[in-house]
Image: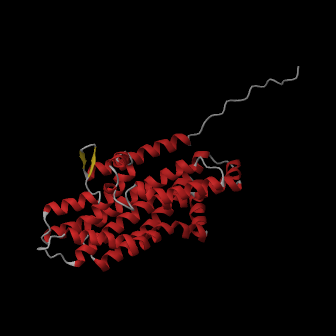
C-alpha cells in the first residue's frame, strides 16, 4: 500500500510539475470558452430569442442563463474525457523512456502500478475539471444564476462520474500505446472528435437521423445530456414561469438533447445516469482484467547436460 501511495504522489507531482502537460489539459476548456463566447453562444442566443412568441416578454437574463447552462455542460462533458487523456500521457511516457521497466524491476506488482496510474489520472483530471467547474459557476452567477442547491450538487456528481468514465477510457486506450506518435495521434483524435460525437459542440438533434441512431448507442451522448439537464433545468423553469408556452419549452429541451429517445423510447434522466454508471462499471471490469497478474508457466529445461 505504501508503494501505491508513493507512486500516486509521484504521478500527480509530475503532472502538475510539467507545465506543458498541465496547460495542454486546459486547452479544451479554453477553446470551448472562446468558441462559445465568440460564435456558438450568439447562435444559440438568437435561436432562443426567435422561439419566443411576440406577445411574451422574456427577460434577457433568462436567455443568458440558458446559454451559460449550455456552455457549462459542454465544457465539462468534453473536459472530463479529454483532460483524462492528457493526464494519462504519463503512462505511455514511462513506457517510452523506460521508467516503467525500471519500476517493475523493483518488487512492484504490475497491477499496483496500473492502479497508481488510474488513481493519479483521476485525481489530476478531477482537479482540473473542478477548477473549470468553479470558473463556470462564477460566469453563470454573473450572467444569470438559476441553479438550486440540488442542481449544484448534481452537477458535481455528474463531473465525478464523467471523470471516472474518462479516466477508465483513457487508461484502457493508453495501455495499448507504445510510442510518442501513437500517443499524439490518439490525443488529437479524442480532442477533435469527442466533442462532436458526444453532442457537446452541436446538439445530436441537429444531425441526420441515421447519425442520431448511431450516437444513441454511445454512453457519451447520455453523459452530455445528463449534465445539460442539471445545468439548464433552472433556467428552463424560469423561462416557463415567465410565460413561455409549454410546447416551446419542450422544443428547446428536444433541440438541446435534454430529452433523448432510443428508437422511439424516451430515456429518463435516471436512466441516463444508469447508462453512464453502468459503462463506468463495465470499463472498470475491462481495466481490471487487462491488468490482472498472470502466472508465467516455467520454461521446460530441454538443454540439460547428459
In depth, the one of 161 and 28 nearer the eye is 28
Q: Quadrant of residue 53?
A: bottom left
In depth, the one of 301 and 204 nearer the eye is 204
In depth, the one of 61 and 80 nearer the eye is 61
Q: Using the image, determine if residue 282 lies above or below residue 232.
A: above
Furthest toward the bottom, the residue is 142
The image position of residue 242, as x and y in percent, is: 14, 72
The image position of residue 147, as x and y in percent, is: 26, 70
Point out the image quarter for the C terminus. top right
Q: Is residue 91 in view from this perspective?
A: no
Q: Using the image, determine if residue 140 lies above or below residue 170.
A: below
Furthest toward the right, the residue is 306
Compared across the picture, whether 219 is left or right of 12 comes to left
Task: Give the residue drawn at x 58%, y 65%.
Answer: 15
Compared across the picture, whether 115 is left or right of 302 comes to left
The image position of residue 42, as x and y in percent, is: 33, 73
Task: Give the residue drawn at x 12%, y 70%.
Answer: 243
Task: Give the residue drawn at x 53%, y 51%.
Answer: 171
Task: Give the residue drawn at x 52%, y 40%.
Answer: 289
Number of numbered discs overlaid on the protein picture: 0
Compared across the picture, whether 227 is left or right of 197 comes to left
Q: Is residue 21 in view from this perspective?
A: yes
The image position of residue 188, as x and y in percent, is: 55, 58
Amino acid at each position: 500500500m505504501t508503494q501505491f501511495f508513493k507512486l500516486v504522489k509521484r504521478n500527480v507531482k509530475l503532472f502538475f510539475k510539467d507545465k506543458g502537460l498541465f496547460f495542454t489539459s486546459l486547452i479544451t476548456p479554453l477553446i470551448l470558452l472562446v468558441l462559445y463566447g465568440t460564435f456558438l453562444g450568439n447562435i444559440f442566443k438568437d435561436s432562443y430569442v426567435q422561439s419566443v412568441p411576440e406577445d411574451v416578454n422574456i427577460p434577457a437574463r433568462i436567455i443568458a442563463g440558458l446559454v451559460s447552462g449550455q456552455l457549462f455542460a459542454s465544457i465539462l462533458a468534453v473536459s472530463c474525457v479529454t483532460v483524462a487523456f492528457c493526464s494519462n500521457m504519463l503512462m505511455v511516457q514511462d513506457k517510452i523512456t523506460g521508467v516503467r521497466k525500471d519500476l517493475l524491476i523493483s518488487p512492484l506488482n504490475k497491477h499496483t502500478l496500473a492502479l497508481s496510474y488510474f488513481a493519479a489520472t483521476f485525481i489530476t483530471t478531477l482537479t482540473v475539471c473542478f477548477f473549470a467547474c468553479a470558473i463556470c459557476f462564477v460566469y453563470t452567477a454573473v450572467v444569470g444564476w438559476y441553479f438550486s442547491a440540488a442542481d449544484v450538487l448534481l452537477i458535481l456528481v455528474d463531473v465525478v462520474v464523467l471523470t471516472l468514465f474518462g479516466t477508465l477510457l483513457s487508461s484502457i486506450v493508453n495501455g495499448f500505446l507504445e510510442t510518442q506518435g501513437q500517443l499524439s495521434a490518439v490525443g488529437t483524435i479524442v480532442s477533435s472528435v469527442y466533442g462532436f460525437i458526444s453532442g457537446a459542440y452541436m446538439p445530436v438533434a441537429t444531425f441526420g437521423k441515421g447519425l442520431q441512431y448511431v450516437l444513441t448507442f454511445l454512453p457519451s451522448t447520455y453523459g452530455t445530456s445528463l449534465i445539460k439537464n442539471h445545468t439548464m433545468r433552472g433556467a428552463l423553469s424560469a423561462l416557463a414561469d415567465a410565460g413561455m408556452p409549454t410546447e416551446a419549452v419542450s422544443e428547446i429541451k428536444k433541440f438541446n438533447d435534454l430529452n433523448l429517445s432510443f428508437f422511439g423510447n424516451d430515456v429518463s434522466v435516471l436512466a441516463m445516469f444508469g447508462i453512464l454508471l453502468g459503462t463506468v462499471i463495465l470499463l472498470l471490469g475491462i481495466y481490471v482484467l487487462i491488468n490482472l497478474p498472470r502466472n508465467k508457466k516455467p520454461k521446460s529445461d530441454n538443454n540439460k547436460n547428459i
